[in-house]
């Protein structure tokens, strides 16, 4: 009888142990999923996944593939970055069809100017450097060490002075000699406060106060 009782007890424990082990395994798996799935479903922070190729370095060959005379849509495709554009006119009531596009990322910011649907210039106001390692916050001495000779140009609204460095030709968009790429560094308080990139003639045009376009 005692042997029979021991056999019954072992059978009872075996019968209960299997469901309990399976239940524990299932509970553990559900617990893991409860932790992992919300992490997978959590959306990326605003601006983290939609800035495409920005922030970008400014060069005399272009900005992450963007060069003057591109259309707004070509620029969006090249940068893989969507930005809105607003129509406007030239300062003083000029009749040229112009558009302005605000470039807003968590770091790099600025705006683009299009004339007759062709990019003429980009102004960067934050977190921007060139391929020579200078940019926002740099001094005149640092610019000269990076580029050698720079040409003074009239500063735009709100800036004390400006220096320009000029490329030899415009790559790939128009025939050589029709337009030249330039970078203009505008100063406030002895340091670069804006970096402007574009066609040289456009960078010297008076655009008035465009700070309202900023992010």
Image: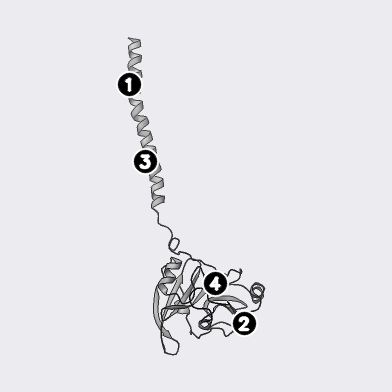
The mark that comes first in sequence, 1 or 4, is 1
Decide: marks 2, 4 in contact (CB < 8 A)? no
Q: How is the image coloured?
A: one colour
Q: Position of residue 172 (x, y in %)?
A: 50, 73
Q: CA distance from mark 3 to mark 1?
A: 28 Å
Instruction: Verify CB contact (< 8 Å) between mark 4 and mark 3.
Output: no
Which one is nearer the viewer's eye here, 6 or 183? 183
Reading the image, the residue beneath label 4 is 61
Pointer 2 local density, CA inside 10 Å: few below 14, some 14–19, many at least 20: few
**Mark 4 neighbour density, 10 Å: few (under 14) some (14–19) many (20 or more):** some
Q: Nearer the viewer, mark 3 or mark 1?
A: 3
Number of the label disc, if any, that sits on residue 71: none
Q: Is residue 136 left or right of residue 36?
A: right
Q: Quadrant of residue 80?
A: bottom left
- For disc 2, the marked residue is 151
**Residue at horizontal 39%, vertical 50%?**
38
- Looking at the figure, which quarter contains the C terminus? bottom left
* Foreground tag (3 vs 2): 2
Q: Marks 4 and 3, how far apart in space?
A: 55 Å
Comparing marks 2 and 4, which lies closer to the viewer?
4
Q: Earlier in the sequence, mark 4 or mark 3?
A: 3
At x 55%, y 75%, the residue is: 195
Mark 3 vs 2, N-terminal side: 3
Q: In this orientation, which residue lies closer to the viewer: 71 or 5?
A: 71
Q: Give the mark toward the camera: 1 or 4.
A: 4
In the displayed structure, would residue 29 be above or below residue 140? above
Q: Residue furthest top?
A: 1
Q: Which mark is residue 12?
A: 1
């Amino acid at each position: 009888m005692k042997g029979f009782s021991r056999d019954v007890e072992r059978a009872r424990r075996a019968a209960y142990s299997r469901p309990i082990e399976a239940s524990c395994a299932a509970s553990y798996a559900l617990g893991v999923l409860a932790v992992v799935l919300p992490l997978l479903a959590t959306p990326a922070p605003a601006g983290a996944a939609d800035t495409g190729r920005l922030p970008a370095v400014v060069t005399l060959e272009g900005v992450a593939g963007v060069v003057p005379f591109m259309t707004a849509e070509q620029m969006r495709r090249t940068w893989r970055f969507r930005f809105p554009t607003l129509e406007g006119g030239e300062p003083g009531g000029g009749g040229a069809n112009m558009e302005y596009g605000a470039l807003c990322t968590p770091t790099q910011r600025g705006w683009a100017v299009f004339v007759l649907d062709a990019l003429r210039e980009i102004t960067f106001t934050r977190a921007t450097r060139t391929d020579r390692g200078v940019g926002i916050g740099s001094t005149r001495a640092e610019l000269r060490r990076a580029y050698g000779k720079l040409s003074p140009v009239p500063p735009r609204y709100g800036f004390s002075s400006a220096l320009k460095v000029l490329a030899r030709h415009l790559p790939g968009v128009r025939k050589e000699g029709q337009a030249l790429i330039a970078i203009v560094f505008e100063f406030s308080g002895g340091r670069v406060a804006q970096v402007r990139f574009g066609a040289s003639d456009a960078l010297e045009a008076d655009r008035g106060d465009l700070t309202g376009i900023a992010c």
